[in-house]
Amino acid sequence: TIIEEHAPNPAAGDADRPIGYGRIQRKEDPRFVRGKGNYVDDIVLPGMLHGAILRSPVAHARLVSIDTSAALAHPGVVAVITGQDLLGLKLAWAPTLSADVQAVLVTDKVRFQGQEVAFVIAEDRYAARDALELIEVDYDVLTPVVDVRTALDPGAPVVRDELEGRTDNHIFDWEAGNAAETDAIFASADVVVSQEIVYPRSHPAPMETCGAVADFEPIEGALTLYETSQAPHAHRTLFAIVSGIPEHKIRIVSPDIGGGFGNKVGIYPGYILAVVGSIVTGRPVKWVEDRSENLMSTSFARDYIMQGEIAATKDGKILALRTNVLADHGAFNATAQPTKYPAGFFHIFTGSYDLQAAHCKVTGVYTNKAPGGVAYACSFRVTEAVYLVERLVDMLAQKIEMDSAELRLKNFIKPEQFPYMNKTGWEYDSGNYERAMRLSMEMAGYDDLRREQAEKRARGELMGIGISFFTETVGAGPRKHMDIVGLGMADGAELRIHPTGKAVVRISVQSQGQGHETTFAQIVAEEIGIPPEDIDVVHGDTDQTPFGLGTYGSRSTPVSGAAVALVARKVREKAKFIAAAMLETRPEDLEWEKGRWFVKGDPSVGKTMAEIAMGAHGTVTLPEGIDGNLDAEVTYDPPNLTFPFGAYICVVDVDPGTGHVKVRRFIAVDDCGTRINPMIIEGQVHGGLTDGVGMALMQLIEFDDEGNCLGGSFMDYLIPTAMEVPDWETGFTVTPSPHHPIGAKGIGESATVGSPPAIVNAVVDALRPFGVTHMDMPCTPARVWAAMQGRPTPP
Ligand code: MCN
Ligand code: CUM
């Protein structure tokens, strides 16, 4: 069921109207459905060579020797690059996005299974792959650090012994909130619930893996790099810094991207190796990883062990929250997040509730696993935060025997409390939580569901109802508080209206499937009245677009979308002056209606945008200070983030014989402020809910004692399909962001953030007759069955 457009809500007035023609079809789809998309692997350049990476079979080992002579002699092989070669070029180590360094190729020691050891460049992909097997490597295997719980023990092997003075695996301690106030409240609270809650390691697994085509042109000293990147401009700056190639000589092109989900934010060794390979061979070099390489070596997600506690009065007033987190960052601290926040935005873990105090502490730790940590539609670790608080709230409800919806309704931040300052420093912009919660309950038929559940329980059937209510913080900057490797988080936009009234808007963010070519045209259409089909959106090429920080953390609409609205308004304002000149009247005598300026009181006399565009480029005498075009540019620095929210209800049936969980119904009410394209929003929500089923029930990147990755293929790492998910029931409310030019908040990660706790809460609710109060994801049949028997969790 899709609620098309809900009944107009007089309180929200015009705000409920989608903007820029609303539910229009995606402009990018004709090329995708006809197989005419242009992905990195579709790029073929004259003389292009192919690279392949030799990866370590072991997790922790000294590199004793590498012999590449047989590989070099293999037919078709042009070059073999090792860590020693890179040392000579000062490129063996590259900076990460978190002030650490990462080995491009191993020089001293292997630090995770699948780590990059050597790079073969050959005439074709097959020769390159074959030659990998001819490289002789001698490893002196070391004991790996696999369990993050013991990684800080004295005597544990030191993963990063190359760092000066390193004697342990500690990366950082970070905290937010007030420990003393929080502890005082806990000390006198009626009820305290404590639980260790694990958000296991998972992986974004986009349909297209990562890859690059590097083309270095030695005469100009210019580099063109086609790359799977969610942030081409930031990548260009980093490539300039690392390679020494001047930034204006670097062009990064991210053409169509087959899904990013945070996997394509960072710069991987493969990209750098393609560049080095092109410089060394003087020919273009393509490198595209396979599925196992993607799963084993690129940015993972989550891996937080959270010791959580919630304090409340006995009648269910939540007072405080606290948590201590052990964060497994793998072998290099390569997570992508604003510099000030090593745990991302995890400190929004107070969720949607009005608390008296909160405190969180996060400890980052090195282990012998692949690096990463911020990925898979996580909103910078809001996923972990929401899971923690929503599990704890459900456990509290169970403990004080209160309905979990009622407990939430009792503790929500109230509409009149916005803007709301939470206890860890976030200023929530706007919200009406009760309205969203009540709508989801109405759509679900909540009371009937609870009655049905009681009847089934009496018959020994296992039905569970799980609720999750989330608040996200998306749209980083503001730049004075937020940067990535020193680059402030703002976004540029440029708009040109051609003489015939057709427009091109250039944006600094990078679509990976979110539909920016459609929705950004809609924003411009709304502001200047040119229809979206007459507005082209250009993105993904640093030579063609203004500087900006890229697409992740659902920041495109909050930041770049705002830039686009403002640049369109700038053009509209400029159009007023030009129209006035054309009509031989004063600008202040003109009035705007969608698409045209007309003379106040005489609507028959006016100029459309197309007429004004022609006028701007024509022969009319323009006023002082107005150039002869209808173009503008802006850079937008957001004053705050946006805080989308949602109320999710999940209904599951558990097979008492096998422990298999079936998600029977899922109701998702989202509020992302002003909605641009309701169809695209629903697509984002459907995708995110499907992600949630994957994480909650199926997915895990596990390691054995030797540090072998047990989730390195789709045989082991499961991707949910239409078979595993129900027909999503989506609804929405609209609470505009007061500080965003069009009132829009992000939506791209909401459902991935919000759905796992609803599903796990439903599973735990189903298992209540067995006295189960918590279980860790993924709720696989084996684990659910073990929980029913009161046995320890199997892997
Ligand atoms: N939108 C809208 N109205 C709103 C908010 C958003 O119509 N009020 C539209 C936007 O205009 C955009 C889409 O919804 O077309 C998502 O917008 P936004 O929430 O701003 O998120 P981003 O565009 O910044 O996308 C990033 C986000 C992230 S971080 C991950 S991870 C994720 C996600 O998007 N990766 C995706 N959704 C994805 N969807 C696809 N198909 N592929 C991915 O890799
Ligand atoms: Cu955290 S995944 Mo998205 O921000 O690209």
Image (cartoon, grey):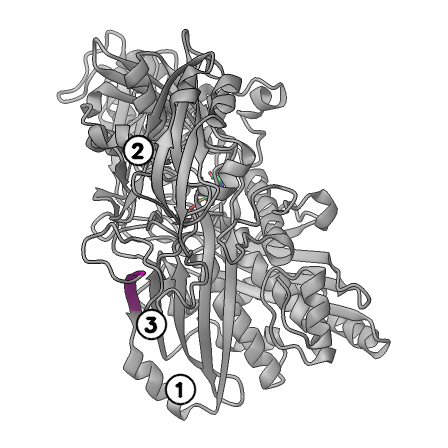
Residue picked out by circle 2: 83
Q: Quadrant of residue 176?
A: bottom left
State whether residue 517 appears in this view. yes
Q: Is residue 198 above or below residue 496?
A: below
Tell me which label, 1 or 3, sits earlier in the chain.
1
- For the record, the magenta segment spans 169-175
- Asked whether residue 688 is drawn in magenta, I would say no
Q: Quadrant of residue 396?
A: bottom right
Q: Which mark is residue 423?
A: 3
- Asked whether residue 171 is drawn in magenta, I would say yes
Give the amino acid at mark 2.
Gly
Residue picked out by circle 1: 186
Residue at 58 percent of width and 25 percent of height: 29
Image spot of residue 667 (x, y percent): 65, 57
For label 3, the SS is: loop
Give the amino acid at mark 1.
Phe
Residue at 39 percent of width and 27 percent of height: 119
State whether residue 520 appears in this view. no
Spatial separation of the CA atoms under disc 2 and disc 3: 47 Å
Quadrant of the image containing the C terminus: bottom right
